[in-house]
Amino acid sequence: MLCPKCGKEYEGSECPNCSGPKIIVNQSDYQKRKEAYEKKQAELKSASSYSAAGEQPQKSANTDNKASEKNNKSSGEYEEINYLEVMKKVCDTGKGIAGTAAKKLSGREINFKKYIKPAVIILILFLVIGAAGTGIYRLATRKNYELYMSSNQKIYNVAGFENNYVCDMSDAVFAVDNKTFYTPAFPSEIDKTQMISSMASANGEYFAAVIYHEGTSGYALYVWKEDGSRVKCISENAYFKDIKYITNKGKVIYTDAEVLNDEGAMGQIQLYVYDLSEKLILVEQSLREAYVYAGHEKLICHNKENELYVYDYEKMSLVETISEEVSNVYIEAEEDNFFTSNAGTVNALKSSDAVIYGESGKWYYYDLAEHKNKYIAQETDAAAEFVYEEKGGYVYMLFSDRIAYREITSDDVKSMIELDTLTAQNYVYQGESNTLIYINSKKELCCAEKSKITVIDSGVESGSLSQVENTNTGFTYLKGQERYYCESSSAKPVKIYDGAEQKVSGQALLYKNKLYFYTSGNLLYTCSTKGKNLDKFGEVERFWLGTEYK
């Protein structure tokens, strides 16, 4: 075991080298659970499996599985991950924020090589915070929020007629939604110039931050209360720390990762849960990926031994093991029934209670509440995304080059239908109306309602479709140098901008009946929903609807 405070490897529950916290490791009977899983697998071996045409489902081995506890196994050999390739997928919002952090580091007159690791990993961190992936789902509408923008490391409130300075970026700590922010008192133990990441609880009572110490090339994770009191250094060693979530009770979920080189390659990753009683739980020693379903206080964990399991971070106990042979995991994004491998780390919706996973060449939908799974289709593309409407009895499978549709009922799965072809995974799913909007390979803007397709417009630029934030149904797209806005899939398109300075796929939002959107060079424009009164704000790093709390 690696001590989360000093990094020393040791056996037992307490590090003999330092006064680090006592680590509680789940010591459940893994062999007993494994035998139960294998017995269930054998019982279902006789079930028929789907052919390519897909006629009869083969249930996963864990159907109706009531889990026993999970034993954390040793990690085995390190798996080197090329995070520089992952960085290329950072979305526009993430780029802006990560670029800001990178500038802060690079602006110091020091040996930059020492900061390669934190700068690289910051970019990876904001891949999660931003709206990752090219598939877009409807963002929740926000009422009684104000419009903010960041420029030159400063945050401004632009809700009124003037740009009012709010605070420096270094003084703001954002909640997991990356829109709500606080300006807490920082304890003396934290040097803000060395802070590489931070997070606030949703209620603003607790804060966590990761500090990079240049002298020791080490990372320290702190948690404290809003007034700067009850500060605690949870962990300090050479392992990079990624804050996954901080609860309203001050419980911190984070990972420790070994950094193999200055390019950001990672080795062993461990997942921890810490609370203010100084109890530190090692949930997983060999993590591949972890997601937080905050509405249910659950962790969805996928380790390097291909186990997928659910962990209750409030009760500090295993809930169930879903499968031991999982190749890919697709998490429900913050839009009901939309599943993607590019979802953010945290989903706060109480309605989100399912996961899709790949096992033995097949995709399954797993209901966390009912502890049951359902076969979807043969696994053909790991980069696929899904719209699974269980009540409606159908699923969209969104591939890089096509959209497929299949009807699924409680006792039957019908043949798959190829609905359309794509040149990019660029679509908007609107859960309230159950409509999927996308651009096909013929450059047609289309709307799909189950298997029925309606063409909205033609000559549309591939990859240019963007959901308008703070609306249920609005979206924008490009036709040549012209940007259009649609209030809904049935509304007439309105031209809102005509010019060469276009951003192929950029953020757009609606605030007080005015549209705000980017063009190239991060130039922020605004106009009415009718395309009138076009005005240019200028270059900004980021803009968002949010709330400031002091």
Image (tube, grey):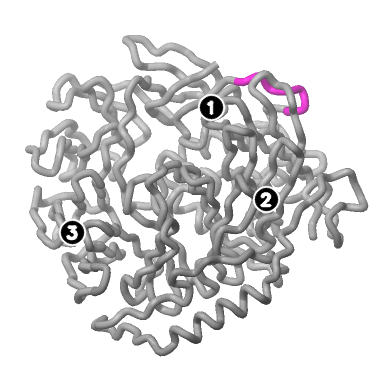
Q: In this orientation, does residue 83 appear?
A: no
Task: Pick the residue in front: 546 or 126.
Answer: 546
Q: Are marks 3 and 2 in contact (CB under 8 Å)?
A: no
- Secondary structure found at label 2: strand
Q: Is residue 111 left or right of residue 160?
A: right
**Which segment did they paint magenta?**
184-190
Residue 196 placement (x, y as % from top left)? 64, 37
Residue 104 placement (x, y as % from top left)? 61, 32
* Quarter of the N terminus within the rendering: bottom right
Q: Is residue 369 left or right of residue 533?
A: right
Reply yes or no: does residue 217 show up in magenta: no
Give the amino acid at mark 3: Asn
Give the amino acid at mark 1: Asn
Between the C-alphas of marks 3 and 2, the distance is 43 Å
Mark 3 Cα-neighbour bin, 10 Å: few <14, some 14–19, many ≥20: many
Residue depicted at 76% across the width and 22% down the height: 188
Query: Closer to the observer: label 3 or label 1?
Result: 1
Between the C-alphas of marks 3 and 1, the distance is 43 Å
Residue depicted at 43% across the width and 51% down the height: 343
Task: Tell me the residue that label 1 is attached to.
Answer: 203
Residue 8 placement (x, y as % from top left)? 85, 55
Mark 2 Cα-neighbour bin, 10 Å: few <14, some 14–19, many ≥20: many
